[in-house]
Amino acid sequence: MPDISTRGKLMPNSPIRKLVPLAEKAIQKGISVYRLNIGQPDISTSEKALEAIRNIKTRVVDYGHSAGNQSLRKKFADYYKSINIHVDFEDILITTGASEAITITLLTCLNAGDEIIVPEPFYANYFSFATATDVVVVPITSGIENGFALPPISEFEDKITPRTKAIIICNPNNPTGYIYSQEELEQLRDLVNKYNLFLFSDEVYRELCYDGYRFTSVMNIDGIGNNVVLIDSVSKRYSATGLRVGALVSKNRELLQTALKFCQARLCPPYLGQIAAEAAIDSTTEYLNGVYNSFLERRNYIVRELNDIPGVYCPLPKGAFYCMARLPVDDAEKFAIWMLEEFEFKKQTVMLAPASGFYYNTDLGKKEVRIAYVLNINDLKNAMACLRKGLEAYPGKMPVQKDVKECVESEAGS
């Protein structure tokens, strides 16, 4: 049998999905599994999108433009203008989800062996996209103690080599929920200008910023227009993850013309998804406010409940719909597996995403998990009851340290 590629061997398993077979076995045994591992909200998809799908009149589902339907690109441009991001529809390429937008961006801007700097923990698939495009990931580690704030710019500068071509951020951040401020983005701008780098910004969670935190797009940072690529998706704000419609946005004409060649190679983005996405952008304010308020309620509940469990520490995320929690266990992945294979409480258990998979160095985050608070409050209550009981029963639980709770109490009082 011929050998498979080195690239394929290096491709990591998804920390979000790799425990799915264990969850399926638990379900086969009659156990309900609360899936807190993946960003799949139970909130109804925008009715505008569903109506558009139901009312499609076309006789032939044909190829579309490689850049995406012009009507959708214009709708995106209008949407961006409404949130003070001023771009033309010709600055936008429609992609098969944000995933393809990132992959095409890497293929367009970096050569094999070039380096991209990314604050960690990071969305695990960034490493997968980099592996698939032969790009080298260079991590800059942030920590749970300060809520995963952007590390000092000096740490970024220390990592820059002749092969460094880009920095990528996710804002608001998946998996941490951190929101990068305008001041932090301006620091990145200065670094990007100093070393002539690209700055890629994954902004798919921009509508989910809590507690008065202000979102700033990289498109609104002066002085780096040709260095910037904005990555977007309709998956999150309209609860339509399966549409697989994203966007690559840039003012850099050469970049867009080059990226379009990769778009042509895959022919076109999903026809039906584009129709639904175009309609979803017209979702009512009532719908969007309902989505926002649901996630805010869920965040407040789950962070409070997590920090009430002895030995658990969870900083308050500022945005998105994820939180990172440190557990009093010997190894969070072993614990997550144990919860699916050996534990049940009232015929229920919880599926978590071990955080080590969100770090480049998998020795980091060994006691952390990412939790997606995408389920309704009643399901979250049941999930937290399972987690509490599971931590009590887990054979590898660690002694509770007082300083963990003191840290939580200090943060709550500030």
Image (cartoon, helix red, strand yellow):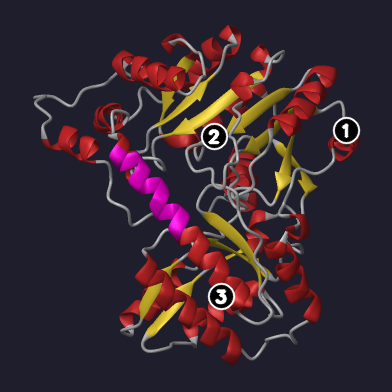
Label tally? 3
Percent of width and height locating residue 38: 46, 58
Q: Is mark 3 on a helix, strand or loop?
A: helix
- Residues under numbered marks 3 and 1 in contact, where contact means CB atoms less than 8 Å apart: no
Residue 74: image quadrant is: top left
Q: In which quarter of the image is the C terminus?
A: bottom right
Q: In this view, does 191 lie to the left or right of 318?
A: right
Q: Mark 3 points at which residue?
A: 336
Residue ID at (68%, 70%): 313
Residue ID at (27%, 50%): 44
Is residue 288 shown in magenta? yes
Amino acid residing under circle 2: Glu
Q: Is residue 411 above or below residue 213?
A: below
Percent of width and height locating residue 274: 29, 28
Q: Mark 2 points at which residue?
A: 203
Q: Which of marks 1 and 2 is nearer the N terminus?
A: 1
Q: Which stretch is magenta?
A: 286-297
Amino acid residing under circle 1: Glu
Q: Label 3, label 1: how many angstroms apart (C-alpha)?
A: 36 Å
Q: Earlier in the sequence, mark 3 or mark 1?
A: 1
Q: Name the residue under label 1.
A: 157
Amino acid residing under circle 3: Ala
